Amino acid sequence: MLNDIYQYDLRVLLWCRKSRFYPQFIAMVRIISRTGDGYMQFLLPLCYWLISPQEGKRFVIILLWACAIERLLYFVLKNSLKRRRPPEIVTGFTSVIEASDQFSFPSGHTMAAFLLANLCVLELGIIASPLYFWATSVAISRVILGVHFPTDTLVGATLGSSIAYFVVMV
């Protein structure tokens, strides 16, 4: 089964490599990936707090708890599972960007993006649902840029979403 998952990862990753022939597309993908660097996790709650101080403050506290859990889980999984990144595993493959850390699984950008998207939807309702498009775009960008396998982002999305739900429901 693990071999089947690896073969799926490899096929999708190599298919994404074709996009590198389109410089404008890659420039856009880099920008999308950068939005997952943590800026949104700071700016959105700040804006909410400024617009609605009481609800915004409560949301910031929930987000801080969720981010603490997310970062701890991210660190433990990355450093215990130690899945190498695509360029280290796939012969002749290079990534478009330099990854910020050594290991690939799970995708921290994806995990944090889906955590924020889910928290916003749980807090604000359907009006925040476009954040799912953003979070999905961040996940896809990480694969296109060659720093993650697809399963890294799928697990990151699942973990981020689960943490958001857990923190809100507790």
Image (cartoon, rainbow, N blue to C red):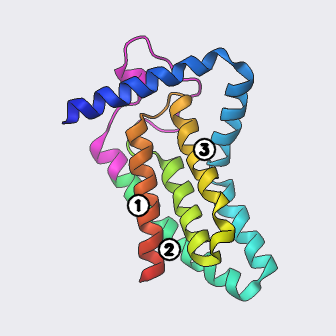
Residue at figure coordinates x 37%, y 42% from the top left: 105
Q: Principal SS element in the magenta part?
A: loop
Magenta segment includes 74: no
> Residue tagged by mark 2?
65
Question: Which residue position is annotated with label 3?
Answer: 137
Residue at image point 63% right, 54% down: 38
What's the mark number on residue 72?
1
Instruction: Identify the residue at horizontal 53%, vertical 57% (top origin).
Output: 114
Distance from label 1 to label 2 (Cα)? 11 Å
Numbered disc 1: secondary structure: helix
Label 2 to label 3: alpha-carbon separation: 25 Å
Bounds of the magenta span?
A: 77-102
Q: Are marks 1 and 2 in contact (CB under 8 Å)?
A: no
Query: What secondary structure is marked by label 3?
Result: helix
Residue 96 falls within the magenta-colored stretch: yes
Does residue 15 lie above or below 63 as drawn?
above
